[in-house]
Image: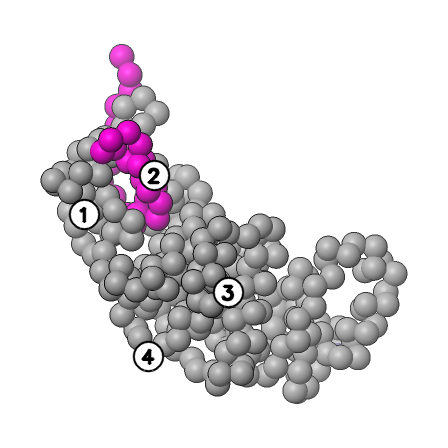
Amino acid sequence: MAQTEDLEVDGLVIREVTTGESDKVITLLTAKHGRITITGKGVSSMKNRHAASAQLFSYSTFQLHKRGNFWYIRDTFFIECFMNIRYDVEKLALANYVCDVASDFALENVEDPELLSLTLNTLYAIANLDKIPLEQIKGAFEFRAAVQGGFMPDLYGCAVCGCEDEAEYSLDVMNGRILCKKCRTLVENDPSFIEDPSAKIFIRITQPVLQALRYIEAAGTKKFLSFTLDKVELSLFAVICERYLLNHLEHGFTSLEYYKNIKI
Ligand SMILES: [Zn+2]
């Protein structure tokens, strides 16, 4: 007889793929069990009582039942769906990208409450906090996701000489550190460093952006958006956060390309 198992879990739908006429394979992000893939029988049909819970960006309590290797829905209790995301194409595109990044970091059967909290708070901000520019929400999420995912840079002073009060530094992306102008020149000319060009990604970083990144590193998943940058600094911040995340993940996202295309 096939082994069966029951599970009750709060989960956010971060991916949905329609299969057949009204079935879906959905991916849940959970605090205790990481990523869970579920077969949702009939949930594409709006008449289905689990349809609201089984759609992208919905956060619900799921009662699941495992048969063989597959999880099936026994019952759902809807909590939240960040409705305002669906009324704006730019918000919708950004939320899709956020879920793709979360899916990239989430592992099956690995507890990660911070990733769920970060993703839920980011979706909430996209949906409801219109005073915060989407560029800022996107960048802060990208940088925070990278930090939580194990790519925490050391942003406290030049990694070589230790100086802390230069107006500008270079972020040495792949080595997760900052360098002052003088030390960057030294590092760039160091023969051992030249041997691996893929590790050589430097981006100019100013004090206000540096302070924003330090704030995000220290802030936790609830207050990571509570900072302000002027327009010019925000553009630099956005470039740095995106490049920092993508270079460490070593791949791009179709959903990110889509988001950028609709912004133009
Ligand atoms: Zn230095």
SS under mark 4 = loop
Q: Mark 4 belongs to which amino acid? A: Lys
Quarter location, residue 16? top left
Visual colour scheme: one colour
Of callouts 3 and 2, the N-terminal one: 2
Near mark 4 (Cα within 10 A), the count class, few <14, some 14-19 or many ≥20, is: few
Q: Position of residue 32 (x, y in %)?
A: 34, 46
CA separation, marks 1 and 2?
15 Å
Q: Residue at label 4?
A: 131
Of callouts 4 and 2, the N-terminal one: 2
Q: Mark 1 belongs to which amino acid? A: Ala
Q: Which of the two residues, 1 or 77, is positioned nearer the viewer here?
A: 77
Main secondary structure along the magenta-highlighted residues: strand
Q: Which mark is residue 17?
A: 2
CA separation, marks 3 and 2?
28 Å
CA separation, marks 3 and 1?
31 Å
Q: Mark 3 belongs to which amino acid? A: Phe
Q: Is mark 2 within 8 Å of ligand 1?
A: no
Q: Which mark is residue 52?
A: 1
Magenta stretch, residue numbers: 1-28
CA separation, marks 3 and 4?
20 Å
SS under mark 1 = loop
Quarter location, residue 123? bottom left
CB contact under 8 Å: marks 3 and 1:
no
Q: Position of residue 47 (x, y in %)?
A: 11, 40
Q: Mark 2 belongs to which amino acid? A: Val
The relative height of residue 66 versus residue 26 in the rendered view (above or below) is above
Horizontally, residue 239 falls left or right of residue 21, namely right
Horizontally, residue 114 falls left or right of residue 51, namely right
Of callouts 3 and 1, the N-terminal one: 1
